[in-house]
Image (spheres, grey):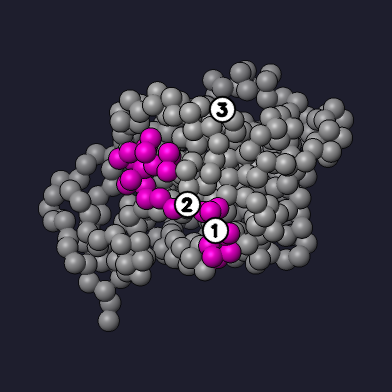
Amino acid sequence: MSATIPKLRSSSEPSKPAVKASRQGLICMWHGLTVSGLWNLLRMKPRISWAYLPRWITIAFVSGLNSLYGVLEKLFFGRQVARTEIVHPPLFILGHWRSGTTMLHNLMSLDPQVTFPNLYQCVNPGHFLLTERILAPLTKRFLPETRPMDNVAAGWEEPQEEDIALALDCQISPYLMTAFSDRREAYERYFDPRDMTESERSIWKQSFLRLLKKLTYRKNSSIVTKTPAHTFRISTLLEMFPDARFVYIKRDPYAVYKSTLHLRRTMFTENALGPPEFSATEEDTLYFYEKCIRTYEETKGLIPAGRLHEIRFEDLERDPLGEIRQIYQSLSLPGWNLVEPKIQAQLPALKAYKKNAFRMDQETMQRVYSRLKWVFDLYEYPGHIDS
């Protein structure tokens, strides 16, 4: 028997207008590929059409520059990066996409004691040590003011998720889905290293470690990272970083579903290399959401006591200062006196921020609730949407 929604918002209620977000502009994710990376991607046979020829031409041209810059960076920084040790345990922000991971990452990254991967570094993982200080100021004009899926700032210096860097550096990342929206089998195993082949897992670890070493070489401090795919990777992350700390954020499943659906459609469109396919988007969104939550709940017990803190997005939105304070206390993080004024200064902007508003009809609510009732129950969210 399918689950029934306990309460429903009337379908006759007028929908709130969605916030208009800027388009991505001239730069797409794949402009960070090198020549070898582009060749690897082509070998996977993505969807291609003549309509996307201008994008392919610019990607091919920029890939040559990326390869050249990468060679030069290795000449100037290769030995130093290889000798760099990650002595400060990283902090991993976990949670499904659109659960509030970006807001949490932005707040945690205000700490002057930490470092984090930014947008430029994630889009240019092979040469940011060499080029960031020069090219970031020169190319910032080509970026939109906000991300294409919401109203979050999109500057080169803004915190970003490192799975973008992994997709570009080694082509082993679930973010290959933007090029293979119709082929789940092309990227599904890249969520969890345990599902990869031995060779893929080794390459992935090397790529990830190299990125973190470069960040550490730039600033030798604890790295705060956020990529939702890490929610699948707790066991592997603990193998690599036994002393790591974790923060997990959860959110109302209705909001996560609708916002993730919007995210997928937007990112597939903005970063496609051929006509994007949306026929399986709703099912894939539910499928990976369930898989993400199940994997987290099955593996979070591996994290030693005192190394994991869980929060709700709704609480973070209501009291960001208080919730971040609890994280610092729970995980025994130092320097709260340095972080508190930074967050206080951001409170007016957080209050003024306008989220996207998505209306959900009763049929969709019923389908989502029937599929995700166990998540609603587990995280104690009601099966209705507040007006």
Which mark is drawn over residue 112?
3
Query: Which element is circle 3 on?
Result: loop
Q: Residue sitting at 48 percent across and 47 percent down?
A: 330
**Relative to residue 2, is residue 121 depicted above or below?**
above
Q: Residue sitting at 73 percent across and 46 percent down?
A: 209
What is the quadrant of the N terminus in the image? bottom left
Looking at the rendered structure, the number of numbered marks drawn on it comes to 3
Q: Nearer the viewer, mark 1 or mark 2?
A: 1
Amino acid, disc 3:
Pro
Marks 1 and 3 sit apart, C-alpha to C-alpha, by 26 Å
Amino acid, disc 1:
Ala
Marks 3 and 2 sit apart, C-alpha to C-alpha, by 21 Å
Which mark is drawn over residue 305?
1
The main secondary structure of the magenta stretch is helix
Depth order, front residue of 231/286: 231
Q: Residues within 10 Å of mark 1 (few under 14, many from 20)?
A: few
Residue at far bottom of view: 1
Which mark is drawn over residue 309?
2
Amino acid, disc 2:
His
**Relative to residue 43, is residue 102 depicted above or below?**
above
- Which numbered disc, 3 or 2, marks the residue that appears first in the sequence? 3
Instruction: Report the magenta residues as a range.
Output: 299-326
User: Any magenta on residue 300?
Assistant: yes
Q: Residues within 10 Å of mark 2 (few under 14, many from 20)?
A: some
Which mark is drawn over residue 255?
none
